[in-house]
Amino acid sequence: MGRHTKVGFLPFASTHRTLMRRSMTTLCLAVTAIGCGKVGGAATRGAERGMARAIERDIGRVWERDAARDAKLVAKPLGKGRTVFRYTTAEQAAMEARGGVQAGSHFTARGGPGRPLSANVARGRLGLDHLPEVRETIRLPAGQSVKAGKVIGGARGVGELTPTAHVPGSAIKRVLRIPPK
């Protein structure tokens, strides 16, 4: 049978792949329902704790990979000025408006008109370890030395800039509160 061959005995399943997906979904739902009992509940809680520990380890690995990657990137001056975004907390944005943005902070590769990403989407796409509250619009001047790379721990292929020198607070043009979800 080919890749798109119909399965004759189940009218709702159009391909073997669809049949497999539906079977796995049913199996997962059944295991979850069984886990609601006294013995199964303890196993489910144990699995949840294990997953939480694994996620914490993964975040640590992402930070290590990010630092190692940043160390390898070559800094280049911007040929012309560029508008970028930085998703952060309201408290951090207030501090940066007064004192500027530290060298080594992460910005989006480009910024332009349009609505900001929601907090959850920004967190997932940009690989943030916190839920952002605001989006800063920053104008980097021509000649600003930056390292250009891809986001680690976020969506595939999303670019980021990391300045190698302090960015003054006057470069922050706008701070916009973003929706939480």
Image (cartoon, helix red, strand yellow):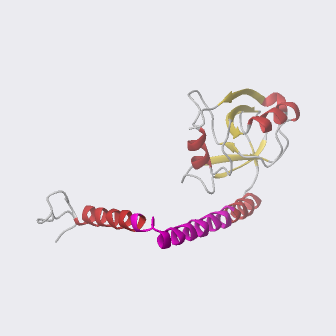
Can you name the residue that lies furthest to the left here? 8
Res. 143 visible in picture: no
Please state the horizontal and vertical placement of residue 96, each as a whole percent of the image: 82, 35
Residue 122 relative to residue 148: left or right = left
Image quarter for residue 173? top right
Q: Residue at x 82, y 39 (%)?
A: 101
Res. 174 visible in picture: yes
Can you name the residue that lies furthest to the right here? 99
Please state the horizontal and vertical placement of residue 140, each as a whole percent of the image: 75, 34
In reply to whether residue 28 is colored magenta, the answer given is no
Image quarter hosting the C terminus: top right
Please state the horizontal and vertical placement of residue 104, each as a whole percent of the image: 79, 49
Magenta residues, start to end = 33-59
Q: Residue at x 76, y 51 (%)?
A: 75
In this view, the residue in front, 64 or 92, is 92
Image quarter hosting the N terminus: bottom left
In this view, the residue in front, 28 or 103, is 28
Characterize the magenta stretch by its predominant secondary structure. helix
Q: Is residue 96 above or below residue 63?
A: above
In reply to whether residue 51 is colored magenta, the answer given is yes
- Tally of numbered discs: 0
In this view, the residue in front, 160 or 12, is 12
Please state the horizontal and vertical placement of residue 175, each as a whole percent of the image: 72, 28
Q: Residue at x 54, y 70 (%)?
A: 42
